[in-house]
Amino acid sequence: MARQDALQGSLPLLVLKILARRGPLHGYGIAVQIEAMSEDILRVEEGSLYPALHRMEEAGWIKAKWATTPSNRRARAYDITAAGRKQLEGELIRWRSITAAVDAVLEQA
């Protein structure tokens, strides 16, 4: 299957879930995790990821701080907040509802 961009609207869900599981990561690390965990099906471009991270930080779902990477580069490390964990619960419920509805249509078509 060809690699494709992450589904519209699912990026916050994916980011929050990864941060909840993995702990603090920098943007590149988040993108790598999405790609690896989706078995190379989903790809997140920088032009989508960093604006989404900024919006999520402004919403209070994640927090960022400067950290040094293993290769001695400075990068912002993102971590989920309590508000982000609450948002993640809501996003999961919404996602499951949407995918169940799509499955229902596909089964009846």
Image (cartoon, rainbow, N blue to C red):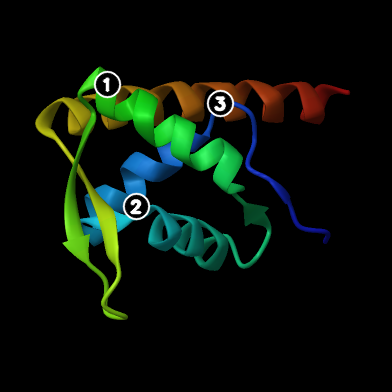
Q: Earlier in the sequence, mark 2 or mark 1?
A: 2
Alpha carbons under labels 3 and 2: distance apart:
16 Å
Tell me the residue that label 2 is attached to.
Answer: 18
Alpha carbons under labels 3 and 1: distance apart:
17 Å
Residue type marked 1: Glu
Residue occupying image coordinates x 27% and y 79%: 70
Q: Which of these two is toward me, 11 or 1?
A: 11
Residue type marked 3: Gly
The disc at residue 58 is 1
The disc at residue 26 is none
Residue 93 place in picture, x, y as percent: 39, 25
Whether 75 is drawn above or below 83: the answer is: below
Tell me the residue that label 3 is attached to.
Answer: 9
Give neighbour class at mark 3: few <14, some 14-19, many 20+ (Cα, 10 Å).
few
Residue 73 place in picture, x, y as percent: 30, 70
Quadrant where the image shows the N terminus: bottom right
Q: Secondary structure at mark 3?
A: loop
Give neighbour class at mark 2: few <14, some 14-19, many 20+ (Cα, 10 Å).
many
Whether 50 is drawn above or below 41: the answer is: above
Residue type marked 2: Ile
Q: Is residue 67 left or right of residue 4?
A: left
Q: Which of these two is toward me, 49 or 98?
A: 49
Answer yes or no: do the residues labelled 3 and 1 have beta carbons within 8 Å? no
Q: Secondary structure at mark 1?
A: helix
Q: Is residue 37 left or right of residue 7?
A: left
Alpha carbons under labels 2 and 1: distance apart:
19 Å
Q: Earlier in the sequence, mark 3 or mark 2?
A: 3
In this view, the mark in front (2 or 1): 1
Residue occupying image coordinates x 39% and y 53%: 27
Residue 3 place in picture, x, y as percent: 76, 57
